[in-house]
Every structure is written in structure tokens, then in C-alpha cells.
Amino acid sequence: MILSHYAVVGMVTLMVFGVACIGAAFFRIAPDRVDAPRGWMPYTIGFPIYALIFISFDMEMIFMYPWAVVFIKQGLKGFLDMLVFICILSAGIAYAWGMEGFKWE
Amino acid sequence: MGVILPAVGVVIVMVLGAFAAHWLERGLLGSRAEAGAAFPVRIRPDAVIEQADRWMYPAGPVSALFAIAAGLAVIPFSRELVAVDLGIGVFYFIVVIDFTVLGLSMGGWGANTPFGTEVYYRAVAQLVAYVIPLGLAYIGAIMMAGSLSTVRIVEAQSGIWFIVVQPIGFVLYVITAQMQAFRAPFLEPFSSKIDYGVLRLYGGWKAWAWRVSLSGLLFAVSAMGAVLFLGGWHGPWLPGPVWMLIKTFAMMVLLVGLGARFRPLTTDEMLQLSWKILTPVGLANVLIVGGLILLGVGVKG
């Protein structure tokens, strides 16, 4: 059952690759050459704090999906659980904001 | 149902949807230069960049195409007309649709040019900005439907559409969907400052693949908006798939038409908007929706 479901996804993937290969075969006619300076060099990232806090929030989202599915059955208990969780998360945002993490460096 | 037929259907829907989105945007935007991923470029012959990575550079558009096709596989056009009704539908959609950002990263970094690197860098910043508020907008709809399956979410809206009971969630979705689709005002990876990003860099079949996937991205994101908040195939008189198409088009007009009214934001402003306003509002929205469900609003039987 599960396997037959994901077989459709697998088939879609194969077909996309097939379409790309057909495109590549059709357009392979005397390509131009482009001269451009190289781009691989060390550079500074402007959003390090955003990136770090993003990772922690992305993990948190994984917890929220199963919680959202069973929320109607859980009722008030589930609501209070999430209230505590969101308070902790908001403290995280407030801390990052307070230490001036939310700006471009 | 077999496997081949739904898969062929998905690829056809992707191509037709991309054409529809492209045609619609051209009509709405005219020849405005700053149009984000909808920038009108003439598709030129393929070009070889000497220093580009041999595999990563062409892998970019293929990854983006895969994202759109795989994402559209779970979009239901009626109760039966869905390629595959996965139990984790919307979660799967969020994950696979972000392969466009992976594609932009691979294409931009693989090209090994200064502007290409800039595209990679700004596309990742855009991902960091939109994923969390977008997910929080999804959570509201999932809570009321009690399921991750796209078909179940639409069925839960047979009485009342979620846009009525979750207006904050819908506004969050509209803003983050514009970020996700790289449409105005969040078009930094495709702005004229960096020579329209990958759209000028690529040629030949890769440029076609980018065109289809970036137009298809708007179509897929709008279709998901119709599923989550506008009640999918539900509607009077007309058959279900027609309603779904009408709602998807309405969503596209809303995203593009609204976005064109604002000045383009820089990546810095976008990150601030996302983390200082949208994320706290999204967290509050989860609690508001939870309170509404406890009061019995929007929940069936």
C-alpha cells in the first residue's frame, strides 16, 4: 500500500529526468562560450544568527505537525502543552532580538 | 489505479499550469522589468561557462523541475482526481517544494560566477525567512482538519472554508507564498542588481526548465493555498475540478497583483519582516486557532 503510493512519486521523478534528458538532446547544438570572472572565493555570510535560530525553529516545526493532527482529540491538555512550548520559543525569539541578532552583518 | 497514468497526468498538469501562470503574469504585469522569477527573458542558445561545475550546474534546473512535479502529485483537483493521496500530504509538499531553493543553490554556486554565487546566497536567505511562518500558516489548517492528507483537509472544509475562521493564517500564507514563489516584492534573487539571477545565466534546455519550474512554482503554491484555505473543490453548481482551477487562478491573481503594489524589499528587510513580525504572529495564530477549536468553531461533528 505504502509502496504503491510512493511508486507514483518515483515515477514522476523518473519522468522529470526523462523530460530533462529529451530537452538536453534537442538543444545540444553548437553552444556559445561565456567568459565570466570566477565566483568561488571566501566571503562573509550576512545572516548567521538568523541561520542558527532557523535551524532550532525548523526542528520545533517537526514537533508541531503531529501535535496539530491529534489536537482535536487532546483538547485543553494539548492546548496547554503547546502554550508552554510557544512561551519557550517566544523567549528564544526575544533573546535573539535583544542581543541584536536580527540584523544584517 | 496504475502508476504510469497519474505520473503522466502530473507532468502534463505541471506544463499546462506553468503556461497558464506565465500567460497570467504577463497579462497582469505587462513588461515591468522588476518581476522577480517572472522576468521576461528571451531564451537564448545554450552557453558554456568554462569554470562551471560539470554536474552541479545542470543539476539545478532538474532539481527545480522535480520539486514542482513531485509537489503537484499531492494536489487534489477533486476527491478522486489526485495523483496520490499520501497520508503525510502537506508535510511532503512543504519538503519537496523547497527543492527549488536547492536547485537555485546548486545552479548558482555551480555556475561559479560572482552573480551566480549571489543568487545562491540570497535564495538560501529567502528560505531562512519564509519556511517558519509558512509552516505556522499550514499548522492552523492541519489543526482544524486533524489530518496531514490534502484530500482530508479539503473534505474538512465542506461546511466552512478555513479562510473565514483563520483570516490571520491566510494573510500569513499570502505573504510567505510570495516569498516562496520569488514573486514581487520578494524578488531579490532575481533582481536587476544581480542581472536577473539565473534567468540570464542559463540558456537552451536549462533555461526552458527554469522557465517551466519557476512559473509552475507559482501555480503549485497557489493551488496549495486553494487547498488549505479556499476549500479546494467545494463550490455550488460547477463541477469540482473547475472550482479548484478557479480558486487557483484567483490565488495567482492575488499573489501577483498584490505583490506588484509594493516596493521590492531587500533580503535584509525581508529577514527582519519574517522574524520580527511574521513568526510571532504565526505563533499567536496557532494559539488563536487552538482556542477556536476548543470553542467548537470550524470543527466538523
Image (cartoon, coloured by chain):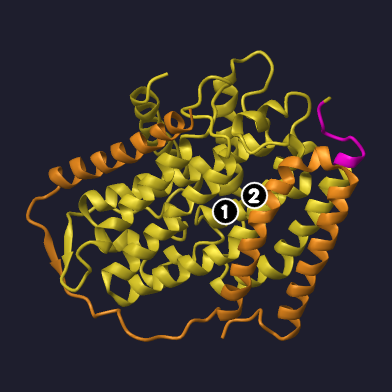
Chain A drawn in what color? orange
Q: Position of residue B234 (x, y in %)?
A: 67, 23
Q: Which chain carries label 1?
A: B
- Numbered label attached to residue B178: 1
* Residue B220 pos. (x, y %): 50, 41
Q: Which range is magenta?
A: B293-300
- Number of numbered discs overlaid on the protein picture: 2
Q: Colour of chain B?
A: yellow
Q: Is residue B239 visible?
A: yes
Quarter location, residue B142: top right
Q: Are discs 1 and 2 less than 8 Å apart at CB?
A: yes
Q: Does B297 appear in magenta?
A: yes
Q: How many angstroms separate mark 1 from mark 2 (CA)?
A: 6 Å
Horizontal relation, residue B171 to residue B123: left or right: right
Q: Which residue is drawn at 79% across and 68% down?
A: A88
The amino acid on which the numbered mark 2 sits, given as a three-letter code, is Val
Q: Is mark 1 on a helix, strand or loop?
A: helix
Mark 1, Cα crowd under 10 Å, few <14 / some 14-19 / many 20+, is: many
On whether residue B166 falls in the magenta region, the answer is: no
Dot 2, crowdedness within 10 Å: few (<14), some or many (≥20)? many
